[in-house]
Amino acid sequence: MQVHRFEKVWLGAALLLIVGFIATVAYGSVGVGVAMVDDSGGQINAQAVQSGNTGTQFDDPGVVREGEDHYAVYVVARQFQFVPGSGDDPIRVPADAKVTFRVTSADVVHGFAVVETNINTMVIPGQVAEVSARFDEPGTYGLVCHEYCGAAHHTMGGSVEVVPQDEYESQQQQSMNETQLQSPEVGN
Amino acid sequence: MALNRRQFVGAAAGAAALGAAGTASAQEEPDYGGWFDDVSNFDGTVDKRGQDTVEITVGAQGNNGNFAFGPAAVMVNPGTEVVWRWNGKGGGHNVVSDGDGPLDSGSAVAEAGTTYSHTFDSEGIYKYVCVPHETLGMKGAVVVRPGGGSGGSGGSGGTPEGPPANPDYGGWFEGVSNFDGTTVDRTDQDTVEITVGAQGNNGNFAFDPPAVRVTPGTEVVWRWNGKGGGHNVVSDGDGPLDSGSAVAEAGTTYSHTFEEMGIYNYVCVPHESLGMKGAVVVGGPLGGSGGGSGGGRGADIELSGPQWLLSGSVLLAFFSPLLFAAAMRRRYSEQPPATSDDLTLATGPAPVEEAAETEPAVEIGHDEYDPKGTAALVAFYFVLIALLWVFMYFVEFLGRVTVIG
Amino acid sequence: MVFVDSYPKTSKLVRSEFIVAFVALGIGALFGVIQALHRTGAFRGFVSSADYYTLLTAHGVLLALVFTTFFIAGLFAWAVSSSLERELPQRLAWPAFWIMLTGTVLAAVAILGGLFGAPSVFGHSLSADVLFTFYAPMKAHPAFYIGAALIIVGSWIAGAAYFKALWEWRSDNPDERIPLQTFMVLTTMLMWYISTIGVAVEVVVFLIPWSLGLIQNVDPLLTRTLFWYFGHPVVYFWLMPAYLVWYTILPKLAGGRLFSDPLARVVFVAFLLLSTPVGFHHQYVDPGIPEGYKFIAMTNTMFLLLPSLLTAFTVVASLEHGARQNGGSGYLSWLRNLPWDEPAFSGCALAGLMFAAGGFSGMINAGMNINYLIHNTIWVPGHFHLTVGTAFALTAMAISYWLVPQLTGKPLRQRSLAVLQPYVWFVGMALMSNAMHRAGLAGIPRRTAEPTYDEFAFQGVAGTVAEMRLQIAIGGFLLFVGAALFLVVMADTLLARRGGTLSVNGSIPDPLSGPEHSPRILDNYKLWTAIALLLIVIAYGPPLASMVIDGIFAPGSPPIPV
């Protein structure tokens, strides 16, 4: 086989590039600790999510404190809103704490991306997507459904409000008191 | 404004039905101010006056799926209990008033058999939506009016004068994002409420509704919702409205009773430049169902022009080869027959030959050729993508809040 | 002798395939410009935002499935027929064409029904707003799935015609090396057979019965995985025909000869081996799939860069050879000696240049964790408009300027428009694609009618959002003009009268380093197919097993019409 010497050099360079890419990604995983969305969230019955009787936190989605420095956010994505997240119901989490998003779908495939962060996952019926992150900067982040989910897909957005930790805790305390004071309004 | 096939189909059907069914209820058909424009299953207001309880299905067929209230609009007497019943289709739904209103069934639920009810005591038009599917057209309205049968609302005497059905605001609403061209009809109500701090104009810098028509003698109440900072309500130029300096607190109200017919323009002084402007139209066409809805339908058909353009373009694309063939035939039939045509008739297809092969100036063989230009180009490419990769990975990617588990 | 006179039957077949492809291109391009104007907010009067997705589905299916498959079927028919010097077996090739056309009409009617109020047909509403990827549990009309299946089945039968031609040729030429063009076609088709199994199973076993109501539920993750088993190789099904053109025709157009036949064969074998076991790189951020499988897919994907990087060298070296034979010199000044005013050449060369840029964004897409940065943002359409939308589409258009005269015996008409057309496409794509990539970095999603939200606003990363929108709108418009110019040239040429001296010459010179220098084992399809299947079993066996072990329909989702 005739291979020109320039081609041999280029073959070597190309292999170097490929190995370099793989090494960078491996460094990101092992060295920096960037984890991929995987099967850790487990499975769930999508129809039960829709009717709200999964027997899990997804029946009452929202933020749950899981540890001293660890909060879990249960989010149900449905045509065409995040609960919580969309409209006047932003996801509120504290800064400088580990926040684990557990997201699942009540109907079709959705996406869940927090704008300008690396939090970006598919939301597939039957699966629970689990991603953790730590927000250093308080502020409001956009939330986008990035997978086409039906005729009003483009309206499906939301926001994540990251508030300083002390402020977050005092607000939590306040709202809990309010909840206890209010008598439950029965609408059904 | 984007148009919508449902509007288009609805408009066509509506135009056809206008002569037949439309006239019968024209007297009583309330003007919803465009509320039902994109609601596919809206087919007039169903008169259920005289019943104590009225049921509405949540998840009825319509709006491209099970995204409808059935019926979309009902008319009931004051004191009627309206019950919304979920049929379990189309995912999670809820029933929430548009703007400030009494209805709120809470967050969306899907389960069949769920109900929510409300008893309407005061007259008026109560618009509501299913929040998750509002953009699809899942909207409804309850019209509370006394009477029943053929009695009508008693307003048919009409107001002799006043601003026309589509008032000319003289450019007042240019740059007001939440004004969609409709003047919301709130005639025949004693009190009309306008939200101060509604969403619009790039924030909570809007009056909702921005333009409203009322009957002379109506008290208009502005209610602050606490959003978007401090607002006030002040007439443009010489006018009766002045709520004083801007306040932010939710629940603040300011009211004025309009006796004289005319158009009253007003602004929120701090946010006027953002487009926080409004107008109250006092007097004018009653109900407006004839003129108003007719005008609306006309506009729908006008809007569907681009849709015809699209359908036409697609058809044109399909048939363009034929059109082209026709054009070419004409072109050739105008030319005098060339001699080769005779030849074709005699001997079959015209002879074709390829272009001559272009000979290179010099022949260069494999062993005497070093692709040094190629080497230079690929070396440049190598460096470029290596640098871009490092930038993308270590600056753009690792510089962000990242996934740690 | 001109191809049309040597092989009139195959010429007619190729012309038919091309005409269907061009009609699909025209409609797809029209829908494309409507979307570019709609989503950027430049003009939203054509359709409502809900109907945007109908056009988006049609745009994807008509361009990425119909235009590509028909054009490739035609190109391959020409390549096999001319390199084996015989007519293609008509009894296989024509039924393949008609089956594919039937499938196309079914799918197109199902999609476009959505623009006309989705009337109920056979008990299902006639619409298919499910986009090119048709992820369950969004449900389309059954005709959409049946149509898609027929297009695939038709392409299988078309492939059988190429293999039958090879066997006929082999019995006449027992000891010869398979001609390079036929080798490339058959390698591509083997890859296609292996990879379309995924989508065939997805559609035939799951989606058709499910859409008809015969089964209640499907597993959204499993059907997605089957789609992407096919969804990445399909991009090589688009790319490899472009490579066929770049390797075998482009050097001649540049006045030179292919630098190396053996490396071309190595490259195609590498694609056969590695194209399929990489689909999980489209599912890097899917829940339910362990990270290890994603990493395996990534290493395979990264090694798939190798054949493309080798191609870059071989093709550019072949062009440089042509330039130097025509007086070119220096390190870069030889570029001036290339025939930039020859549309077949300039189109292919500009397509290759854009592919180099698309290659870079593909490398980011392929990086497992950096995929978080751009997954499902508009960066991704920015990428594939450079690859399938330029590397393939512009090459297809450019080579039509060279092929169609030979297939019809009619000289190319409207030459001045043809000369301009590749540059219009290039400028349009440069504007649109760079803005899409940057908008993707700002987090703006793909597949949306109105990328603005009530709850927040996007901030541009490099440049402002308004400026990116403007570039996308102008670029999209120029691309539409580019497609229209091409169609005018083609229509005028196809309808012109036959006869006279053509603008092109169909002979292809021998490579500088011919097949005699390549090892015979490269032509051993059985071996390469076996290795390809083995790699697939390694990459897909365990994850598919874990998805079906809990029941093939679980966790299940019932159909949700959109």
Image (cartoon, coloured by chain):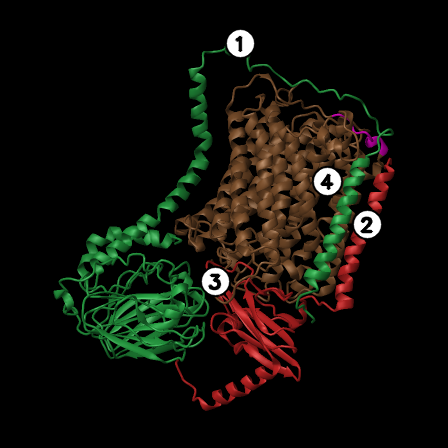
- Give coordinates of residue C38: x percent, y percent: 47, 51
Residue A15: image tag: 2
Q: In the rendered structure, the residue with mark 3 lies on which chain?
A: A
Q: Which chain is green?
A: B
Cα separation, mark 1 vs mark 3, equals 67 Å
Q: Tag 4: residue type?
A: Thr
Chain A, colour shown: red
Tell me if residue B22 comes above or below residue B339 in the rendering: below
Residue at mark 1: B343
- Look at mark 3 in the image and give the residue it sits on: A155
Q: Label 4 marks which chain's residue? A: C
Q: Is residue C515 magenta?
A: yes
Range covered by the magenta-colored residues: C509-517
Q: Badge 2: how crowded within 10 Å, few (<14), some, or many (20+)?
A: some
Q: Earlier in the sequence, mark 3 or mark 2?
A: 2
Q: Which residue is mark 4?
A: C187
Secondary element under disc 1, as helix, strand or loop, is: helix
Task: Say few, some or many: other residues with alpha carbon within 10 Å of mark 3 (under 14 / 14 to 19 / 20 or more).
Answer: many
